[in-house]
Amino acid sequence: MLTVDTDRCVGAGQCVRTAPAVFDQDEDGLVALRDPAPGPEQQADIRLAAALCPSGAITATPQH
Amino acid sequence: MTSAEPRVVDFPLRKPGEAFPPPHYEEYRKEPGLVLSYLPDGRKVWLVTRHQDVRAVLTDRRISSNPDHPGFPNITATMGVPKQEQIPGWFVGLDSPEHDRFRRALIPEFTVRRVRELRPAVEQTVDRCIDAMLAAGDSADLVADFALPVPSLVISALLGVPPVDRDFFESRTRTLVAIRSSTDQQRDTVTRELMRYINRLVEIKAKWPGEDLISRLLATGSIDPREMSGVLMLLLIAGHETTANNIALGVVTLLQNPEWIGDDRVVEETLRFHSVADLVSLRVAIEDVEISGQLVKAGEGIIPLVAAANHDTEAFGCPYTFDPARTERHHVAFGYGVHQCLGQNLVRIEMEIAYRRLFERIPTLRLAVPVAELPFKYDGVLCGLHALPVSW
């Protein structure tokens, strides 16, 4: 499961730089999902994006 | 909780002749809990040096950025974070949710996409500075002729500040960020001058809007005109001084490690390696909080040292080695938490284009004096160089 929280987002853009196929910034500059169901090849980048996010706006829970 | 008495250490100002980051940060990280230091006015302050602890401090809601809280560890009366009554709109001195209104209004100006659109303008600015250096001869001061004008001209164009006013705001900023060589009175005077200047600029933009950030921000109405002075002063100062230090120090490091010239990964590694804003994040506990087993009481000051965190062996392999190929990317050179640098993506493209164009166009660039003789900044909250004599 991949969820993003625009209330927590501070628009640093780390996620867009790390996983540009998955994350985007909306017109307010806040996190948006470009791909709500990213494939397994994106998982490493998503985990890194979640770890780099300065405000904890990205939650990525591994799927079983 | 650690019961041992905390180790008391010198206040972490850079000293002439000493390596940076200072080797004793390594010892501080090995101490249990935190180390204790004293501000120039004698108040005690906790120093945070482990990467994990720095990230924890910068995201803990019991720890505040607001200098209105008693015990806030400003370095001197005018060195640190100003109160809203001193500079309204200086929003890095506010916590969520008050802070968020300012940040939200500015985020659209600094998105990855918007910054990418600024790339041609940054390239043009960089090339013009190199043109001027080449036209002037076969030597230059790379700080005065390149590292400082590039970010100054870029942030001026973005904000809508007339480029001819560079000398004015650069010289005032130099006074503001120097600790011992400027007095509280001088810093107070230049703060007033900068505020007066920006307030006038805001009045002009309100009457005659242009294609710039100030005009767009005024049009949104989300920030009170009175608060614009703090917002804009922050963007103007943060937008040129820190980037200039990164560009200059990065060029020195690249000349010492020429095998990395032309590799864009040097940007991220330069940010980590030099961590120019080591002493910029200042915090105060507003509740009792435990950090790595160390009790910090409400009202006690905390300084998370980002250069120390970025050289923590628990977080980075061989942290004292300049290695742009390293895979760890979690440096805190831009801070962490809700205050993480808003302009970080602009800084990155400025550094990338500056290094790339400089070495493409002046491949024979070399230092004109030995590294040991370079005038490093020992007197400020930021690390950097006062000058960088080069020739080609």
Image (cartoon, coloured by chain):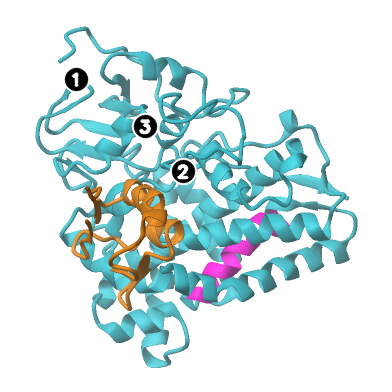
Residue A21: which numbered mark, if any?
Answer: none
| Distance between mark 1 and mark 2 Cα atoms | 27 Å
Which residue corresponds to mark 2?
B329
- Mark 3 vs 1, N-terminal side: 3
Subunit of label 3: B
Identify the residue at image location x=30%, y=75%.
A28
Which stretch appears magenta? B144-158
Taking depth in this image into account, of B122 and B42 the one nearest to the observer is: B122
Taking depth in this image into account, of B370 and B254 the one nearest to the observer is: B254
Which residue corresponds to mark 1?
B293
Residue B78 visible? The answer is yes
Q: Amino acid at mark 2?
A: Arg
- Local secondary structure at mark 2: loop
Q: Position of residue B22 (x, y in %)?
A: 52, 23
| Distance between mark 3 and mark 2 Cα atoms | 12 Å
**Looking at the image, which residue sits at the far front?**
A64
Residue B51: which numbered mark, if any?
Answer: 3
Q: Which chain is orange in the picture?
A: A
Identify the residue at image location x=53%, y=71%.
B116
**Picture layout, residue A42 above or below residue B74:** below
